[in-house]
Image (cartoon, rainbow, N blue to C red):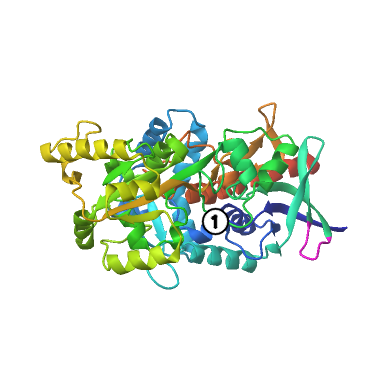
């Protein structure tokens, strides 16, 4: 067995792990980082950018919220069912972290919102090429990786950690296997778990979040994100937190659905379940978490966005709602896009000549659907939605011709929670005391959402990862300093 030593060991090289590694190396610590995949970046390679509160960008544009307002709104949103000290520490640090990333060479194009009514906290990374969008944050991960290398961080890629070593109530290292399968034992003053959660572990998702992957939830499945760090932390006594999925919604394979079609099926038109009944105010569909929540309560956790020929023609000119992930403004070339998609056989989008045909294709209960449309059209005629009070500007009657429907399920960017930490990113044991030398950052420890991801503050998950990585290092420096004082006490 190969034996190595370092000041700090980081498990996984995603947003939390890379940020921690760079911050530690900047402080003069020797750092070893183990990553089970062949590349760094993790889930952040698919993302767009982190949250920042009171950054120089938001302050220059006089954008809200302040740190105090953000904390108040965040805690109200989560009903104070989360660790307030951890939330405050994360939000307070987030603006400074934007500046820290810029000093490393990361460029941000603007603080953005996700949907109308959310805050402009999302600091979109400027990609190497093209406009900001999904995958833009991979540029930030590349910069962090190179900076870590320049600072002397030692990377073990394709090297999975399989055990955390705990001795005398303190975590002192890990055991791993390198890409050739050779065993490694690494020892350090401190260990940070940053493995990105369990978003690609069907077993853990079913056990801890209550969904069946590819049946009633279709998450973004990032390679390697299988809950390893959480399980290993539990094995050495880490206290568990509530665990959930970071719910959103969409068609089953949204990244392979033409974005114009995908967004056409997320506009605030008639939304029904298998029973043929409305179940929400469709105007909130832009808030993907709220819509995901509503879908989980329906039969088979499924909903159908329905529109007709007349509404399609209107969407060819303009969409009612837009977002920064799929920033499409209209459904241009709709017929050719629909035709190509139907031929692809991917499913979950339907075209019919009658309601009877639509019900037959989708499995929606026909008589209920007819009654729902009749009532809905009356609301449109009267200009008032008696059922859910949807805004008048979105009330468009369904009159037929061709009928269209897009089927949606809950989806998720990833998981949330697993390892309990405090505001210092120290892992908490079964006795509610911190475990010496043991820290966790990012999704593995992200239990600050209560039951819903706070999309009113876009960029929260990536921001939490980067900031808790930095917070962990700050407290590791204090821990090592105190530890050294015990070994090398000052002479009196």
* Viewer-nearest residue: 480 or 401: 401
Is the magenta region chiefly helix, strand or loop?
loop
Label 1, secondary structure: give it: helix
* Viewer-nearest residue: 147 or 83: 83
Q: Residue furthest top?
A: 431
Question: Residue 164 vs residue 262: left or right?
Answer: right
Residue beneath label 1, please? 43
Q: Which residues are magenta?
A: 177-182
Q: Residue furthest right?
A: 1
**Residue 179 magenta-drawn?**
yes
Instruction: Tell me the residue at 73%/34% (across/down).
Output: 237
- Quadrant for the C terminus, please: top right
Where is 358 relative to 431, above or below?
below
* Viewer-nearest residue: 430 or 225: 225
Instruction: Tell me the residue at 26%/37% (across/down).
Output: 372
Instruction: Tell me the residue at 69%/35% (across/down).
Output: 238
Where is 379 relative to 196, above or below?
above
* Quadrant hosting residue 386: top left
Question: Residue 310 vs residue 341: left or right?
Answer: left
Q: Residue furthest left?
A: 382
- Quadrant for the N terminus, please: bottom right
Q: How many marks?
A: 1
């Amino acid at each position: 067995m190969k034996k190595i030593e370092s000041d700090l060991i980081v498990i996984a090289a995603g947003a939390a792990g890379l940020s921690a590694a760079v911050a530690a190396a900047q402080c003069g610590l020797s750092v070893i980082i183990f990553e089970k995949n062949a590349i760094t970046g993790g889930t952040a390679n698919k993302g767009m950018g982190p949250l920042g509160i009171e950054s120089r960008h938001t302050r220059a544009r006089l954008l809200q919220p302040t740190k105090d307002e953000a904390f108040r709104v965040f805690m109200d949103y989560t009903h104070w069912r989360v660790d307030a000290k951890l939330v405050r520490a994360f939000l307070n640090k987030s603006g400074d972290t934007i500046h820290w990333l810029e000093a490393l060479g990361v460029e941000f194009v603007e603080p953005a919102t996700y949907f109308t009514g959310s805050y402009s906290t999302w600091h979109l990374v400027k990609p190497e090429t093209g406009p900001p969008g999904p995958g833009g944050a991979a540029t930030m991960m590349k910069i962090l990786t190179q900076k870590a290398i320049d600072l002397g961080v030692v990377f073990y890629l394709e090297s999975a950690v399989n055990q955390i070593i705990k001795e005398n109530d303190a975590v002192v290292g890990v055991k791993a296997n390198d890409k050739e399968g050779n065993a490694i034992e690494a020892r350090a003053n401190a260990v940070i778990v940053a493995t990105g959660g369990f978003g690609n572990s069907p077993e853990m998702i079913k056990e801890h979040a209550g969904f069946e992957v590819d049946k009633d939830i279709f998450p973004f499945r990032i390679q390697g994100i299988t809950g390893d760090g959480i399980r290993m932390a539990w094995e050495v006594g880490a206290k568990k937190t509530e665990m959930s999925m970071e719910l959103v919604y969409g068609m089953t394979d949204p990244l392979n659905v033409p974005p114009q079609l995908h967004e056409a099926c997320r506009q605030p038109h008639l939304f029904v379940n298998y029973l043929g009944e409305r179940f929400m105010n469709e105007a909130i569909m832009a808030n993907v978490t709220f819509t995901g929540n509503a879908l989980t309560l329906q039969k088979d956790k499924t909903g159908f966005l329905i529109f007709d020929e007349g509404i399609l023609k209107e969407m060819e000119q303009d969409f009612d709602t837009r977002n920064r992930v799929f920033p499409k403004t209209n459904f241009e070339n709709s017929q050719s896009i629909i035709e190509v998609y139907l031929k692809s056989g991917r499913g979950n989008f339907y075209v019919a000549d009658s309601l009877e045909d639509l019900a037959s294709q989708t499995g929606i209960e026909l008589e209920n659907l007819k009654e729902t449309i009749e009532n809905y059209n009356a609301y449109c005629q009267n200009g008032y939605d008696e059922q859910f009070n949807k805004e008048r500007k979105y009330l468009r009657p369904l009159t037929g011709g061709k009928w269209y429907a897009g089927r949606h399920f809950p989806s998720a960017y990833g998981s949330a929670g697993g390892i309990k930490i405090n505001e210092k990113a120290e892992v908490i044991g079964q006795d509610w005391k911190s475990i010496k030398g043991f820290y966790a950052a990012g999704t593995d420890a992200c239990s600050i959402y209560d039951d819903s991801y706070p999309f009113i503050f876009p960029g929260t998950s990536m921001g939490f990862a980067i900031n808790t990585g930095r917070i962990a290092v700050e407290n590791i420096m204090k821990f090592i300093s105190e530890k050294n004082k015990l070994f090398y006490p000052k002479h009196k």
